[in-house]
């Protein structure tokens, strides 16, 4: 390998946590559950409607409104009902409020006559709009489009022109929206092209913090460490099963079993066939037992603190002296090359006492180091 891999397009379904599916697949079982729940609610709807206090209250308010006699009483109550349900910005309601003001609040004028057709029109519109308002509140989904894609396009254009600093600036702005392994990988590439190998290694490792199996980051980091002569990180001695059955994979399998169990429960109530009920019972038992198994594996899976021991990266662009004392007068133990990972044991002033991957310990200037984890106050 003669060079690093280039930029990559952000993959929306690439997980932050080490598997490719992420959590987007839950849309499908959620849709099935929604359909089954709808069928179950539809079956119970007559009973639910008779005991719905909100519907009863709204029906009572409209009934009382309909029985009001004088135009001023009717218009005041109609406008108040519309305003109390948040419809004041509607064009029809604005006309209704203006009509109320004309009938009720004009000095020196007697209220005019309100035609019965107008009363019925107001009642009809209020029924429709109040029903629509309830439905929209029930189905409301918050969608906040991200600007990350626009930043990526700008960064890609700058990269293609060889303007790596401009590409880096655009990617840094993207961090305000979301931190993803692909984004951190692209930031690392920009730092590498700007001859800052320590920063590049830092962001490759940050990408791997989110997704330990991110292939491009693994490949580029290995290349960078070889090129810079960094002290290699030893292989993990964790059991083989914990590497294959990762925490994200176990979590997704467990969530899948929960969805399947919920679907089986709903099918049991929606479909009355004895054969279907037997099948749903077997499914519930099977998913329950499998859920217990995966739950136990997840409970005993090595935590992040057992997997990641090196939490800091040497970000200086030149080899940095590791000394016996926390001062420039201390004897030099060795030169640590950029992109070397280490573990900070303690700090004293502007110096940090570190342990390197080869278990060598010594003092190094803290300015040459940066933690892999994002500081809480950093974008």
Image: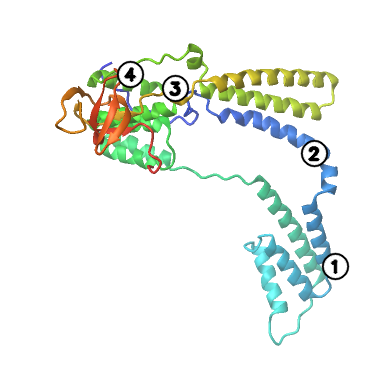
Quadrant of residue 139 within the rendered picture: top right
Disc 2 marks which residue? Answer: 42
Q: Check contact, mark 2 vs mark 4: CB within 8 A.
A: no
* Residue at 33% from the left image edge and 18% from the top image edge: 233
- The foreground one among 69 and 301 is 301
Q: In the drawing, what numbered circle is on residue 233?
A: 4
Image quarter in which the C terminus is found: top left
- Gap in Å between the C-alphas at discs 1 and 4? 82 Å
Name which of mark 2 and mark 4 comes first in the sequence: 2
Determine the CA span between mark 3 and mark 2: 50 Å
The x and y percentages for residue 360 are 27, 20
- The residue that label 1 is drawn on is 67
Q: CA distance from mark 2 to mark 4?
A: 60 Å
Q: Quadrant of residue 29?
A: top right
Q: Earlier in the sequence, mark 1 or mark 4?
A: 1
> Does the residue at mark 3 contact the one at mark 1 (Cβ under 8 Å)?
no
Q: In terms of secondary structure, where does tag 3 sit?
A: helix
């Amino acid at each position: 390998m003669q060079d690093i891999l280039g930029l990559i397009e952000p993959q929306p379904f690439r997980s932050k946590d080490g598997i490719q599916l992420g959590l987007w697949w839950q849309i499908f079982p959620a849709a099935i559950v929604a359909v089954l729940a709808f069928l179950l609610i539809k079956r119970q709807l007559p009973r639910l409607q008779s005991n719905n206090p909100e519907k009863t209250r709204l029906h009572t308010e409209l009934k009382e409104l309909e029985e009001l006699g004088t135009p001023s009483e009717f218009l005041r109550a109609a406008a108040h009902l519309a305003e109390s349900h948040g419809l004041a910005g509607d064009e029809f309601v604005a006309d209704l409020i203006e009509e109320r003001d004309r009938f009720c609040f004009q000095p020196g004028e007697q209220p005019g006559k309100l035609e019965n057709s107008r009363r019925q029109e107001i009642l009809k519109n209020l029924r429709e709009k109040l029903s629509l308002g309830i439905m929209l509140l029930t189905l409301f989904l918050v969608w906040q489009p991200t600007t990350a894609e626009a930043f990526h396009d700008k960064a890609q254009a700058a990269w293609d022109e060889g303007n790596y600093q401009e590409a880096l600036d655009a990617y840094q702005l993207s961090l305000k929206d979301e931190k993803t392994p692909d984004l951190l990988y692209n930031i690392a590439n920009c730092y590498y092209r700007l001859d800052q190998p320590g920063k590049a290694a830092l962001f490759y490792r940050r990408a791997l913090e989110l997704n330990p199996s991110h292939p491009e980051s693994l490949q580029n980091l290995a290349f960078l460490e070889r090129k810079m002569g960094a002290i290699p990180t030893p292989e993990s001695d964790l059991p083989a099963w914990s590497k294959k059955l990762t925490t994200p994979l176990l979590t997704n399998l467990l969530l899948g079993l929960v969805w399947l169990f919920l679907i089986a429960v709903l099918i049991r109530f929606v479909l009355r066939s004895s054969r279907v009920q037997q099948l749903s019972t077997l499914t519930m038992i099977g998913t329950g037992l499998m859920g217990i198994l995966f739950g136990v594996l997840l409970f005993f899976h090595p935590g992040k603190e057992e997997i990641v021991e090196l939490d800091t990266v040497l970000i200086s662009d030149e080899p940095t002296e590791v000394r016996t004392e926390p001062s420039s007068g201390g004897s030099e133990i060795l030169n640590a090359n950029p992109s070397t990972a280490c573990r900070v044991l303690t700090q004293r002033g502007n110096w940090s006492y570190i342990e390197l991957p080869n278990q060598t310990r010594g003092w190094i200037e803290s300015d040459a180091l940066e933690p892999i984890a994002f500081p809480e106050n950093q974008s």
